[in-house]
Amino acid sequence: MTAGISTPQWTTPSDLCLFAIGVEKAYEGQSKLLSEALAREMLSYQSDEIYGLGFALGPRGNALRFWHSGANGGYQSLFEAYPAVGEGAAVMTDGVGGLGLILEIQRQSRRNMAGRTVAWKRIPSPRSAPKL
């Protein structure tokens, strides 16, 4: 049997944050793994919708925001990052109602950050996270 095939592969919120930081660094031209051009393409709108390459993007005209959500077997997760302010978060839940908890955590985070950064104030709270 091939190693890893029968073993579940787990990702942690820390892994997702490190991934987002890596994309942000590439976007700024500071990565040896991902080119700046590709990172900028990934974080650019690819259509009239909200999607870049592999990520959903925040509304046009606001500070750059990218995120990705996922769900399977009762687990739900979402990570988001704001390159202009160097902020981001990843939340994972193990409940069917996890999206509601994730959105509340986002709302509280934005409230806590509102007085510290002008760019953060420009980011509207999502009504719901898109499924990718």
Image: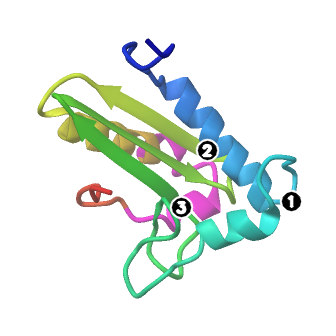
Q: What stretch of residues is rendered in magenta? A: 111-124
Query: Upstream in the sequence, badge 2 or badge 3?
Result: 2
Whole-angstrom CA distance, mark 1 to mark 3, is 18 Å
Whether the residues at callouts 2 and 1 have beta carbons within 8 Å, the answer is no
Mark 3 crowd level (few <14, some 14–19, many ≥20, 10 Å Cα): many
Where does residue 69 sit, x and y in percent of width and height?
Answer: 35, 47
Q: Give the side of residue 128 with respect to residue 3, left or right.
A: left
Q: Nearer the viewer, residue 111 or 45?
A: 45
Residue highlighted by disc 3? 65
Q: Which residue is mark 2?
A: 20
Query: Which of the two labelled residues, at mark 1 and mark 3, occupies the earlier sequence position?
Result: 1
Q: Magenta includes 63?
A: no
Q: Position of residue 5 (x, y in %)?
A: 42, 20
| Label 1 crowd (10 A; few <14 / some 14-19 / many >=20) | some
Q: Is residue 64 left or right of residue 50?
A: right
- Type of amino acid under label 2: Ala
For mark 1, what is the residue? Answer: 29
Tell me the quarter of the image containing the N terminus.
top left
Q: Secondary structure at mark 3?
A: loop
Please tell me which residue is depicted at 56% across the width and 43% down the height of the picture: 88
Counting from the top left corner in percent of width and height, residue 120 is at: 56, 58
Residue 79 screen position, x and y as percent: 45, 43
Q: Quadrant of the C terminus?
A: bottom left
